Amino acid sequence: MHLDKFKKIRQILIVILFFNWLVAFGKLIYGLVTKSAAMTADGVHSFADGASNIIGLVGIWAASKPVDRDHPYGHKKYETIATLGIAVMLFLASFDIVKDSFLRLFHPVVPNVNIFSFGLMAIGFLINVVVMKYEYKKGTELSSDILICDSMHTKSDILVSSAVIVTFVSTKLGFPIVDTFVAFAIGIFIAKAGFDILKKSSDVLCDGEAIENAKIMKVVNGVSGVKSTHKIRTRGREDDVHVDLHVTVNTSMHVDAAHELSHRISDTLKEKIPGITDVIVHVEPLSQKHLS
């Protein structure tokens, strides 16, 4: 199942890579020919979409390796690490676009806009919508950081394309300077997408809370024999959550029964909350301190 999941993600990324670069090369070539800063910026963004797919493929290859002596928890976080590469690419693309937009304020260029420009953007827009919805759906089904983060990247590309179409209209109406300002806004928006991905990835890599404590407590307190639950900690990815917690039991409970209870707690958590793969239970005797 583990390897089958990564195989599916890899196949999805290859298909998406083809469509991302098909759109990217079309926008870049036409943007450079017509001197449209907004379309060129959009092309760079789409190209970064494709490059992020390659980073994702490398991350998936590393994450698919099985547990070994040096990695007792497996290699799944390599997929999360790969999303940091996507964020870096977005930041670099953002910097380049903002810089070019700033220079254009002092050296204005009037883009050549025609019916082919609108047609190319419309086709790219539709492709991105289909790719984004498909990728996000599969990312959610497979609990894949790469697919979900990349769908966020593609979603930003859709909004960017919408902004570019607005610049084409404004150019036709005699306001070509809007092209430069929209390209600048695109650069800022790309940086925001990079920041969102960075935050999501850092929460996993820095062991942020993976599941709300109240949710864990509700499930555990429903297990027969548990008197109370405290010191709950969760960490990891959505599909690989590690939980450790303390529970109190009657002081008369035998060690064998306490051991059996810890297994029931682990099994119940894994059954009730998808994504939990490891549970460590510390059993404590119920005391006056716990009752107060």
Image (spheres, helix red, strand yellow):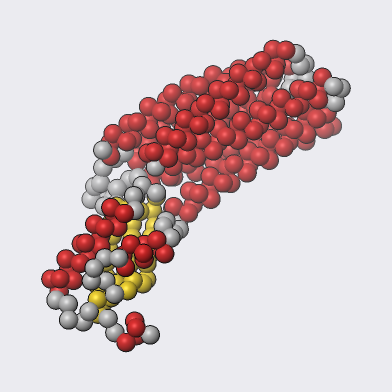
Residue 190 showing in the rendered view = yes
Residue 110, percent across and down? Answer: 81, 21
Say which quarter of the image contains residue 61.
top left
In what quadrant of the picture does the N terminus appear?
top left
Say which quarter of the image contains residue 192.
top right
Q: Which of these two is toward me, 98 or 154?
A: 154
Q: Which of these two is toward me, 236 or 66?
A: 236
Q: Residue at x 29, y 84 (%)?
A: 287
Is 15 located above or below residue 209 in the figure? above
Residue 41 showing in the rendered view = no
In what quadrant of the picture does the C terminus appear?
bottom left
Q: Residue at x 18, y 71 (%)?
A: 258
In the image: residue 103, left or right of residue 250: right
Is 247 located above or below residue 276 in the figure? below
Q: Residue at x 29, y 75 (%)?
A: 227
In the image: residue 199, left or right of residue 101: left
Residue 164, percent across and down? Answer: 71, 27
Is 232 located above or below residue 85 in the figure? below
Say which quarter of the image contains residue 82.
top left
Residue 155, percent across and down? Answer: 57, 34
Q: Residue at x 38, y 33 (%)?
A: 9
